[in-house]
Image: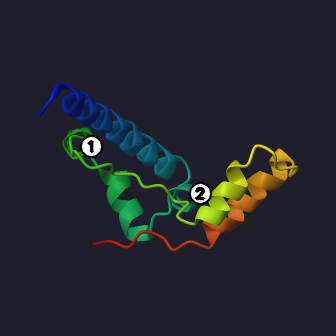
Amino acid sequence: MGLASSELHDEVKELNLSYLMLAQRMLRDDKEAGMYRLGFSVEVADVVAKLTMAQILRLSTSATLLCRFRFNDHAVLSALADKRSKVPQQTAGIHQAIVLAGQTVEQPT
């Protein structure tokens, strides 16, 4: 593994650790809101909420990102990211929530 690959892997591990810790905190603070914001099913939320720190550390070492980008529709992403948009920020947030609400949640594998 080259230096650039090693650095990239380290950054992925750091992001995974941050994501898992944030997800767990969100689920423990308000499970329903956390599930909605993370796109988790009840089963996935239960597993993540119960992870020990050792399990979180072990999972975070994956070279694969554990989080995923939830905007898979080019048109929607482009519209939300358009700097020229005349839509007020509050309305853009509502639109974003509506789009995310229409997506399916993670299914346990």
Residue 4: quadrant of the picture:
top left
Residue 84: quadrant of the picture:
top right
Tag of residue 33: 2
Q: How is the image coloured?
A: rainbow
Q: Is residue 31 above or below residue 28?
A: below
Q: Of helix, strand and loop, which one carries label 2? A: helix
Camera-nearest residue between 8 and 60:
8
Considering the image in quadrants, where does the C terminus appear? bottom left
Query: Residue 26's spot in the image, x, y percent?
Result: 51, 47
Camera-nearest residue between 71 and 84:
84
The residues tagged by marks 1 and 2 sit, at their Cα atoms, a distance apart of: 21 Å
Q: Residue at x 86, y 52 (%)?
A: 87
Q: Residues within 10 Å of mark 1 (few under 14, many from 20)?
A: some
Numbered marks: total: 2
Query: Residue 72's spot in the image, x, y percent?
Result: 52, 64
Report whether 74 appears left or right of 27: right
Q: Residue at x 87, y 48 (%)?
A: 88
Tag of residue 56: 1
| Amino acid residing under circle 2 | Ala
Residue 37: quadrant of the picture:
bottom right
Considering the image in quadrants, where does the N terminus appear? top left
Q: Residue at x 32, y 53 (%)?
A: 50
| Amino acid residing under circle 1 | Ile
